[in-house]
Image: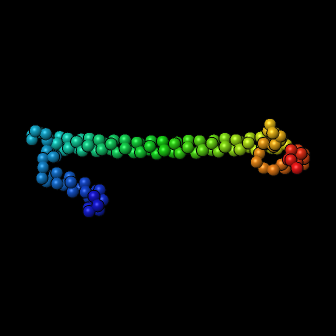
Amino acid sequence: AHQTQGIEPLLDTLFSFLRRKSDFFSPPGGGGDIETGSEAAIAKVNEVVKKHADIYLAGKRKEEEERLKKLRLKKQKREAEAEAKKKQAAAAAAAEKSKEENDGVIEMGDDGFDISSDEPASTPAAAKVAAAAMPE
């Protein structure tokens, strides 16, 4: 098709060949009406064209379905990622809230030492308790 500069010249060359070098347009069985042969040839060409058009359309439908499926999967993935981020943010907020609620609590071990964290006491009351627990 590229060498003949398009599809129409290619088809023209093909049918010219069939007309000149074959019995494609002659009536079936070699006898009968010339018009019948031409009509049969046209019907056969239409049948073949329809077959390939159907194959083409089926391929395009499949491509479109695959494209839409990929879009749906991308959308579901984005939604899942957004949901995961929301859950992560909610968990971080809950952890921050829990930390804020526990800031004034000092846990004391059996030996009387602060075991609530590795950090030094940050409130004045906690500093007094920690200082009282330290031997001099």
Q: Residue 111 placed where, x, y %?
A: 81, 39
How many marks overall? 0
Q: Residue 117 placed where, x, y %?
A: 77, 45
Residue 77 seen anywhere in this rendered image of the structure:
yes
Residue 39 seen anywhere in this rendered image of the structure:
no
Seen at 78% across and 50% down, the residue is 119
Work out whether 3 lies above or below 48: below
Residue 51 versus residue 127: which sits nearer the camera?
Answer: 127
Q: Give the left or right position of residue 3, taking residue 93 as reference.
A: left
Q: Residue 28 placed where, x, y %?
A: 13, 39
Q: Name which quarter of the figure residue 64 lies in.
A: top left
Seen at 86% across and 44% down, the residue is 133
Q: Residue 100 placed where, x, y %?
A: 80, 44
The outermost residue toward the top is 110
Colour treatment of the image: rainbow
Q: Quadrant of the N terminus?
A: bottom left
Residue 19 versus residue 51: which sits nearer the camera?
Answer: 51
